[in-house]
Amino acid sequence: MQDKLYKTTIALAGMIQAVSLVKDLAQTGKADDAAFLSSIYSIFQTDPPNIAAVYQDLSGLRVGLTQLIATFAGDPQEGRALMRYIMSLIHLEKKIRYSTPIFNTLTKRIEQTKKQVEYFHLTHPTVIANLADIYLSTISTFRFRIIVWGNPRLLNTSEIMEKIRALLLAGIRSAVLWRQMGGSRLQILFFRHKIKTMAEKILSQLPMTDIQQNVKERS
């Protein structure tokens, strides 16, 4: 049970990180660079040796773990907004699973884009643009769509929208992982305290950032 809780908490943190970055981009045009890199990295991990490797390592999920804890312990209104995104990702993952043409196209195009990463870095505009186009030409064809709310000026900017669509694709990657690790909607509804406690434990075991180290040295 603890192993399952550990793995589903990581996958849920992956989903929450992706949608938190979407929210930040939509509202401010900015997002945490390290978290963005980790989320995009996860899209290309089709055969990882372990769950942490999906995100390079768990340090890449610091934003997601922190936001997961805040979502389950903080302002209910703020939490509801993020959880609507999460439930939408889970719903879309199920639709992809039952649509063979969409699933096959996604798999093929992600493999093609993976080859680009060999020539460009993970967050190069060309890579992000291709990931956004994959989302637009496959997942966006479903009648059910994720509505992103934010600053209209930013949402009309192609660079911002490409990053948002790439992150939604990353969120669905984590939703796939969530299902594979045994995650369910009931777990989110009835085991929130256990998930929050596990997230706190995982976060506490991560190496300190340079800022945290400096604060500790000064205190």
Image (cartoon, grey):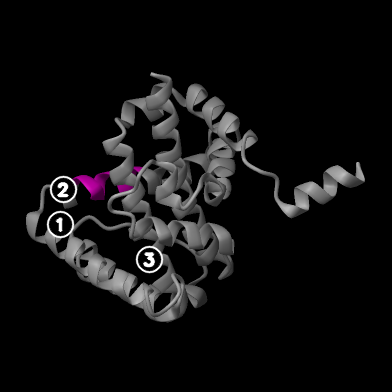
Q: Residues within 10 Å of mark 2 (few under 14, many from 20)?
A: few
Q: Residue 126: x and y, percent?
A: 38, 81
* Three-letter code, disc 3: Ala
* Three-letter code, disc 2: Arg
Q: Which residue is located at x 40 percent, y 21 percent? A: 190
Q: For residue 4, what is the image quadrant? A: top left
Q: Which residue is located at x 17 percent, y 66 percent? A: 108
Q: What residue span does the magenta drawing correspond to?
A: 87-94
Mark 2 vs mark 1, CA separation in Å: 6 Å
Residue 12's tag is none
Residue 166's tag is 3
Q: For residue 180, what is the image quadrant? A: top left
Q: Is residue 93 shown in magenta?
A: yes
* Three-letter code, disc 1: Phe
Mark 2 vs mark 3, CA separation in Å: 19 Å
In-front residue for pair 199/46 = 46
Q: Which residue is mark 2?
A: 97
Mark 3 vs mark 1, CA separation in Å: 16 Å
* Label 3 element class: helix
Q: Is residue 18 shown in magenta?
A: no
Q: Which residue is mark 1?
A: 103
Q: Residue 85: x and y, percent?
A: 39, 49
Give the prevailing secondary structure in the magenta stretch: helix
Image quadrant occupied by the N terminus: top left
